[in-house]
Image (cartoon, rainbow, N blue to C red):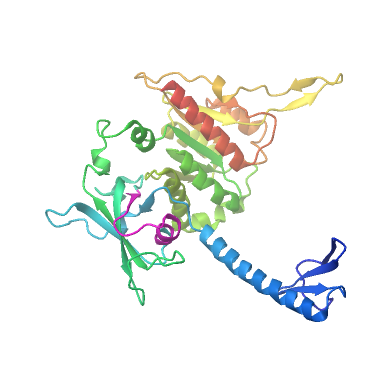
């Protein structure tokens, strides 16, 4: 046993007093050793039987884990550069089509998770960049009536997913003409349902986030776009290590964009938020904050844990008494419309006290809390953005 590379120590247990079985988990196989209560031939047969079945279960588990890596998409999104034909022939019922390769994660999702056949419909849309120079008439389109067509490749002749759910080849998604497709330039309230208005209008919430660990940032960004924000400001702070800004997320723009699109696809939205990276927190607060988020139009909120101490008699003393999100002042803007909200979330160590907190208050931020618990950045972001959206909905 000492010569084997075991990932777990052997575990021995009795089974109704009949036999003792020892499971030895190694890197290559699972070996069963039966006591002398069973004849050697029977023990070998049982060992072979269990080994074969466990190998089969392992294969099925591996396939299942690979399939679970496919994103659960509620809208298939594509970039405007992926559109094949933007000038269909007269009389064509489609305005555009997109062809995705066999190995594309969206193709795998349609085959393995949705199990769609030729002629079936799905929800689709094209991602719209916040930069107007990168947009065209088809960026930001939304449809719930896109038509799919399978294009078999290689030895596969049938235009449908295989028996094990694999795509038979490439996937063509055809986008129908209006009114089944809503173009960005045609978005008027008369053409949209109430659900479309809530989903496709600019979110009234923005996020100022002290840069978290890169791994955590990779989890937070899809969550933020799922909940919906207009702007994301990733900034430095006293308790943010400088090397966080050297993350591959910032060195590779496609990685950052992919994380944002992942959240959009889950929520069904198509509009990317504006993302600003600020290496100097003080400079941003003094030079850029008012320009991006005018005090007359945007309610500024900072979240910080509530500090409590115990007196000599055991009574609780609140050090920095703060309000909840429902208690903030939320007046209308100059034209009588509800204001937007900017929510500032600090690093896991919290904003620096008293300097950073005092600076926020000086710049017109209202300090709120989620309670005395110190939350991780991703948990705080979810809670605060949800409350901010609820406040905007109540004031609408």
Q: Nearer the viewer, residue 244 or 114?
A: 114
Q: Is residue 114 magenta?
A: yes
- Residue at 22% across, 42% down: 179
Q: Position of residue 365 (x, y in %)?
A: 54, 26
Q: Nearer the viewer, residue 194 or 116?
A: 116
Q: Say whether residue 28 is visible.
A: no
Q: Position of residue 348 (x, y in %)?
A: 65, 41
Q: Position of residue 71 (x, y in %)?
A: 48, 54
- Residue at 59% across, 42% down: 378
Q: Say whether residue 244 is visible.
A: yes
| Quadrant (top left, top right, bottom left, bottom right) of the N terminus | bottom right
The single residue placed furthest to the bottom in the displayed view is 41
Q: Please identify the quarter of the rendering in which residue 355 is found.
A: top right
The single residue placed furthest to the left in the displayed view is 90
Segment tinted magenta in the rendering: 107-127
* Rendered position, 5 above or below 220: below
- Residue at 56% across, 49% down: 219
Q: Is residue 350 magenta?
A: no
| Quadrant (top left, top right, bottom left, bottom right) of the C terminus | top left
* Rendered position, 119 above or below 349: below
Say left or right for 58 vs 12.
Answer: left
- Residue at 25% across, 44% down: 180
């Amino acid at each position: 046993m000492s010569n084997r590379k075991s990932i777990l120590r052997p575990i021995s247990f009795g089974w109704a007093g009949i036999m003792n079985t020892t499971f030895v988990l190694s890197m290559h196989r699972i070996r069963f050793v039966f006591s002398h209560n069973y004849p050697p031939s029977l023990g070998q047969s049982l060992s072979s039987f269990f080994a074969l079945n466990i190998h089969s279960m392992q294969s099925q588990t591996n396939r299942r884990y690979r399939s679970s890596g496919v994103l659960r998409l509620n809208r298939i999104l594509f970039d405007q550069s992926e559109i094949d034909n933007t000038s269909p022939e007269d009389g064509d019922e489609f305005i555009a089509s997109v062809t995705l390769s066999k190995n594309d994660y969206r193709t795998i999702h349609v085959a393995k998770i949705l199990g769609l056949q030729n002629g079936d419909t799905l929800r689709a849309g094209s991602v719209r960049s916040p930069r107007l120079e990168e947009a065209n008439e088809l960026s930001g389109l939304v449809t719930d009536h896109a038509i799919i067509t399978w294009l078999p490749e290689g030895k596969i002749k049938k235009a449908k997913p295989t028996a094990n759910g694999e795509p038979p080849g490439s996937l063509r998604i055809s986008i129908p003409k209006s009114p089944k497709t809503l173009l960005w330039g045609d978005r008027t309230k008369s053409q949209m349902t109430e659900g479309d208005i809530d989903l496709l209008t600019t979110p009234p919430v923005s996020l100022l986030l002290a840069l978290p660990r890169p791994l955590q940032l990779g989890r937070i960004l899809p969550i933020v776009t799922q909940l919906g924000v207009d702007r994301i400001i990733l900034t430095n702070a006293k308790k943010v290590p400088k090397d966080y800004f050297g993350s591959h997320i910032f060195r590779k723009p496609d990685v950052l964009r992919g994380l944002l699109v992942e959240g959009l696809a889950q929520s069904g939205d198509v509009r990317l938020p504006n993302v600003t990276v600020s290496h100097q927190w003080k400079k941003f607060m003094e030079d850029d904050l008012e320009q991006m988020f005018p005090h007359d139009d945007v309610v500024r909120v900072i979240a910080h844990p509530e500090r409590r101490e115990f007196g000599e008699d055991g009574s609780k003393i609140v050090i920095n008494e703060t309000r909840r999100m429902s208690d903030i002042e939320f007046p209308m803007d100059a034209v009588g419309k509800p204001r937007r909200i900017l929510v500032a979330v600090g690093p896991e160590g919290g904003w620096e006290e008293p300097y950073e907190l005092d600076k926020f208050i000086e710049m017109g931020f209202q300090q709120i809390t989620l309670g005395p618990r110190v939350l991780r950045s991703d948990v705080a972001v979810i809670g605060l953005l949800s409350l901010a959206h609820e406040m905007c909905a109540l004031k609408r």
